[in-house]
Image (cartoon, rainbow, N blue to C red):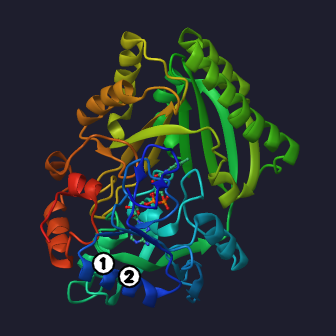
Amino acid sequence: MTAHTWRNWSGTVTAHPVRVLAPRDEGEVADAVRHAAETGSRIRVVGAGHSFTPAAATDGILLHLDHLDAVEHTGTPAPDGSRLVQVGAGIRLRALCRELAQRGLAMENMGDIDAQSLAGAISTGTHGTGARLGGLATQVRGLRVVTADGQVREVGPESPDGGASLFELARLGLGTAGVLTAVTLRCVPAFTLTATETPKRLDHVLESLDDLVAADHFEFYWFPHTELALTKTNTRGSSAPPLPPARRFLEDEVISNGLFEVTNRIATAAPSLTPHLNRLASRALSTRRYTATSHEVFVSPRRVRFTEMEYAIPAEAVVPALREIQQWLHRSGENVPFPIEVRFAAADQVWLSTAYGRPTAYVAVHQYHRLPHARYFRAVEAIMRGYDGRPHWGKLHRRRASDLATTYPRWADVQRVRAAVGPWLFGNEYTDHVLGRLDR
Ligand SMILES: Cc1cc2nc3c(=O)[nH]c(=O)nc-3n(C[C@H](O)[C@H](O)[C@H](O)COP(=O)(O)OP(=O)(O)OC[C@H]3O[C@@H](n4cnc5c(N)ncnc54)[C@H](O)[C@@H]3O)c2cc1C
């Protein structure tokens, strides 16, 4: 045991780093990396600790980059109004969105929370929804990375001398390329979204999926043991009044969090009530339509603790995959009070992106933190593997490098770059498992 104990947000991971450091600038990051290399210790950065997997865990040196959170440079506008913004890698997404808004800018797409650090979010392939848009790593145009020799390298997609390959692993590689100290993001002019949230029958959603997914951002939450789904369609532009603050508080805090915590506690104590509770939960959420800034619409408060597994599958497989999950839930009688979330993304070219090379549907299964999740997640994982599923790097799964290699066409390139940058120093048990352990 050491003096330090670190836990992730969901409580699924505990680690005991030998040292915890919070460097104040890039120079101190480089010193920490050199010190780790000299003393034979591994070194990991933790962002907001929001990965469900032990992605950030280490018994070596743990770095917090909270001091590296400044906007360093805002580029000139491109013809489409987008601008490149260089920012400290430790910045939290909430603070980043605030900084961008002050400059009339926004992130093109986001996931459903903004608590993550920018570097942590891109390193695990964090994504939102939108069939024409990629995950956060696709918004990255450049990086500053402290590599194993303590040098700072500035890399981008066109960098010479192996820099472009280093960029690919660094922008989505679980921190194995080095410590990211700054990120250059392509940001778009600030925009509003009109959100339309409507409960629908699952059959209806699945039958009209092609039309629904054509929206700028579409997702749905299916409540297990019921035929009901809550659909969320976000369209760019303003065409509805803002949500009155009292209604937002009632629906987002009281119903989606407060009441939801209560229904989950009841489901834990009395599993047979789960189908009734899910029906109640899905009906408590009524139709609503409102316009707000993109950031406000993308993000929702998530106060009920849960565990999660999420799989990326080819978009065309989503209906049969959901039907298989539905059949398994029916057969097994598993008690699942948490909805299943379904989102979409465009194909991209980021080597370790779960959407690499194929239009993608994301199927996320959640379980209340007081309920067992192992059997449920194992069953869904087996179904997802049948569709060549790729697990989210930051969410629970049981895959290993040996069976992930075949689903990532650029796996050999990943290993080549890892071998060149020194895979041991920046790794941990999790990266050894999922990317393969390479010797020092
Ligand atoms: C409530 C909740 C909601 C979520 N919603 C979504 C969602 O909508 N979409 C989605 O895709 N995911 C979602 N996630 C998952 C989450 O976005 C990812 O797990 C993300 O990695 C968490 O960011 P973090 O800052 O907490 O990173 P951490 O978990 O702290 O770290 C993640 C990885 O990044 C590495 N890392 C962090 N900083 C650096 C750095 N500076 N240099 C090098 N490596 C670094 C760490 O070592 C680790 O490997 C959600 C998670 C939770 C708990």
Residue that badge 1 annotates = 36
Query: Residue at 48% of width from left, 52% of height from top?
Result: 7
Say which element carries label 1.
helix
Say which element carries label 2.
helix
Q: Is residue 78 visible?
A: yes
Amino acid type of the residue that numbered disc 2 sits on in the rendered structure: Ala
- 181 horizontally vs 38: left or right: right
From this view, report whether residue 37 is shown above or below residue 312. Answer: below
The percent position of residue 295, horizontal first and vertical second, equals: 66, 60
Q: Is residue 244 visible?
A: no
The percent position of residue 80, horizontal first and vertical second, equals: 56, 77
Spatial separation of the CA atoms under disc 2 and disc 1: 6 Å
From this view, report whether residue 287 is shown above or below residue 272. Answer: below
Q: Quadrant of the C terminus?
A: bottom left
Q: Kindly identify which numbered label has been placed on residue 32.
A: 2
Q: Quadrant of residue 277?
A: top right
Q: Quadrant of the N terminus?
A: bottom left
Query: Residue at 30% of width from left, 57% of height from top?
Result: 356
Q: Kindly identify which numbered label has been placed on residue 169.
A: none
Amino acid type of the residue that numbered disc 1 sits on in the rendered structure: Ala
- Whether residues under marks 2 and 1 lie with C-beta atoms below 8 angstroms apart, the answer is yes
From this view, report whether residue 288 is shown above or below residue 68. Answer: above
The yes-or-no answer for disc 2 within 8 Å of ligand 1 is no
- 430 horizontally vs 396: left or right: left
